[in-house]
Image (cartoon, rainbow, N blue to C red):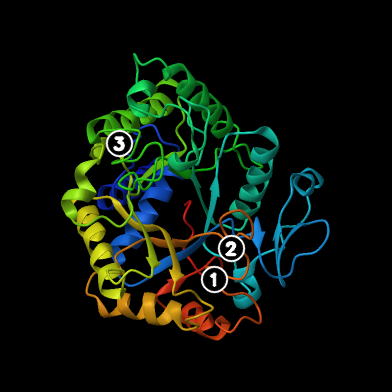
Amino acid sequence: MVPVLKRLLLLVAIKYACYGLPIDQQATLETKNLYSNLLKLSRDGTRFVFGMQGSTQWGEYGGHSPYHVYENGNTKGWVFTSQQAHNKDNDELCDVCSVTNQHPGIMGMDLRDLIPSYLDTVTYLAHKAYSRGEVITFSWHHSNPVTGGSFYIKDDHGDVAHTIQKLLPGGPNNANLTENLDKIAEWALKFKDPQGKLIPIIFRPYHEMNGRWFFWGMGNAAQNTPDEYKQLWQFLVRYLRDVKHVHNVLYAYSPGAAIDNHEYMLTYPGDDYVDVIGLDYYYSGSSSRNPTDLIAKIETIVDVAQRRNKIAAVTEFGSNKPNVDTHPNLWMDLVLKPMKESKTALGIAYLSTWVNRCNGDRKCGHPYTPYKGHPAAVDFLKFFNDPATLWGNNMPNMYS
């Protein structure tokens, strides 16, 4: 038995030597495996996993009672409720599944303000996704701990000046931040599978920091600086990892579509604090947003990730102008075909699109992915069937 065990340990050591380790040296085995497998996929350069935010939480097709319904004119949207989570209902609402008969390989969720009923709901759906072998990511749109106002600067009427500075150690509102991080730690340490093993997650806090819309962003009324942002990120990682001993997290850094490599790296907190080199990108109708620009941005993060032995990923993608209603061939014409024509753009581990949400700032009728019967469904099936895309049923086991 001893020689067999030594051989197994040697194989594990070779695997991690080839494909690297996460920034948390005490990460759980499953978290290390997730990092290694995503890194391997990123280096493969021929295929990537498709993901979607809230893929079974929100949808515009197939909803019914007891799902909650949102209506806007002649269209409807549906949302999985906390009562359904309490009742342990099936998570059958899934726009992507209605077209492909498969779930995305990446399930995105958001921690928001860590309200228990909401957190119970997304945790329940994340457990369901994990049981199917999907990878779980969490973003964090939360209220400003300084003012109590919105994460959107424009909707916060409090004193947002020097927000990050006030949240850093020694600042007057650092306790508010650590209180939130305590809640995240408590949740993460309870996020376990039926065998009691911690479930790994990819945590993507403080994203799109190079934009002006969030309280953690640059160039707005918060007057944050790149150095302050780096300190905020480093504090978050150290607090969760070293103080609270959370070891089932990979950390994703994801600016919006930066102008160039300099802007992308301006707020980069350092190789010791980042596992995933991400990109958030939206087609917005601007003449500067086109497939050539998208591919250039992806090629940039692939280059950055390879030089640092990190995972590359398009952590958030969407198309508002055009959208799948006005450009039914969008997913092939503006995404996959340009990526395949590039020499390096397929060097990402995953591409995750945003949620088909039908309330608030997301009006019904303009989904990011089509659903059954939508005119763009035929094109999306081509995207699905292409060997360059991986899904819930045909992606590698990410946890072993």
In 3D space, how far apart are the residues under numbered discs 3 and 1 (Cα atoms)? 33 Å
Is residue 308 visible to us here?
Answer: no
114 relative to 124, above or below: above
Question: In front: 304, or 164?
Answer: 164
The amino acid type of the residue labelled 1 equals Thr
Q: Which residue is mark 2?
A: 356
Tell me what residue is drawn at x 25 percent, y 74 percent: 292
In 3D space, how far apart are the residues under numbered discs 3 and 2 (Cα atoms)? 31 Å
In 3D space, how far apart are the residues under numbered discs 2 and 1 (Cα atoms)? 7 Å
Q: Is residue 43 left or right of residue 360?
A: left
Q: Is residue 178 left or right of residue 70?
A: left
Question: In front: 87, or 206?
Answer: 206
Crowding near the residue tagged with mark 2, few <14, some 14–19, many ≥20 C-alpha atoms within 10 Å: many
The amino acid type of the residue labelled 3 equals Tyr
Quadrant for the N terminus in the image:
top left
Q: Which residue is mark 3?
A: 273
Residue 369's disc is: 1
The local secondary structure at tag 3 comes to helix
Q: Residue furthest front?
A: 157
Question: In front: 32, or 203?
Answer: 203
The local secondary structure at tag 2 comes to loop
Tag 2–tag 1 contact (CB < 8 Å): yes
Q: Upstream in the sequence, badge 3 or badge 1?
A: 3
The local secondary structure at tag 1 comes to loop
Q: Upstream in the sequence, badge 2 or badge 1?
A: 2
The amino acid type of the residue labelled 2 equals Asn
Q: Position of residue 269 (x, y in %)?
A: 26, 37
Q: Position of residue 65 (x, y in %)?
A: 83, 60
